[in-house]
Amino acid sequence: MQYKCKVTVIDKKCFPDYQQKYLAVPDAGACTFYEIGDEFIFERYGAEDTFRLAGDGTQCGEAWDCISRYIYTALQGGSIMRGHMNDDRMMIACCNSGTRPVIFKIQRLDYKVVKVLGMTGKHCASQIKKSLSAVSGVDFVTVRLDQSWAEVFVKKDAAVSDEALRMAVEQYEKYSVAGID
């Protein structure tokens, strides 16, 4: 099993009374770095390591200090907040700003990488995606044609066997599975 972490900005708050009373810029307003609905995916597979780059400029330093530990836990396949949330693959957290906090939903995404031989174009990618999506326990599939693999995201508490994935791909004679990570 492999892991990604999806971070979504779900809310922004602003406390103008506190800003007026305590800030050097009393009309600072809400955070300008993030917008509600912003999504960021962090991963550490193959040549990709977006966590090591501290979000590669996509994150505010104050926010990164608050959420990076949860992202790291998710990328290692751990329980982000066991017993606190109704899904231990998720956490709701906010940045340190007391006058204009940003609220984040942090989700661990569990997936398997299916390395497929024989994919040559968009039609092949579409066929592989449809076939793998039909396997029981699969939440969604993304196909990386440039890498010759499919990322098969697994539903919470679902068990998806490598053999079921292999059979879904190899039902077509022109494709074979080179490996599953």
Image: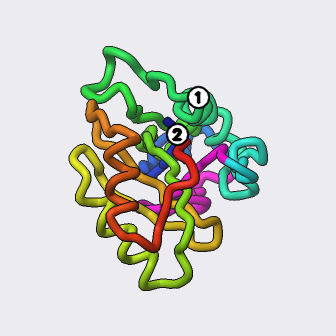
Disc 2 marks which amino acid?
Tyr
In the image, which residues are magenta? 24-45
For label 2, count other residues whose C-alpha is less than 10 Å away and answer few (under 14), some (14-19) or many (20+): many
33 drawn magenta: yes
- Residue 167 locus on image (x, y percent): 34, 53
Residue at image point 32% right, 15% down: 83
Residue 156, which numbered label? none
Residue 76, which numbered label? 1
Depth check: give the residue in front, 99 or 141.
141
Pointers 1 and 2 in contact (C-beta within 8 Å): yes
- Residue 95 locus on image (x, y percent): 56, 38
Residue at image point 55% right, 56% down: 115
Q: Which residue is the site of mark 2?
A: 3
Question: Looking at this rendering, what residue extends furthest in the top direction?
Answer: 83
Q: Quadrant of residue 69?
A: top right
2 drawn magenta: no
Magenta stretch, main secondary structure class: loop
Disc 1 marks which amino acid?
Gln
- Residue 117 locus on image (x, y percent): 56, 66
Examine the rendering and report whether any part of residue 122 can be seen. yes
Q: Quadrant of residue 134?
A: bottom left
Depth check: give the residue in front, 64 or 12.
64
For label 1, count other residues whose C-alpha is less than 10 Å away and answer few (under 14), some (14-19) or many (20+): some
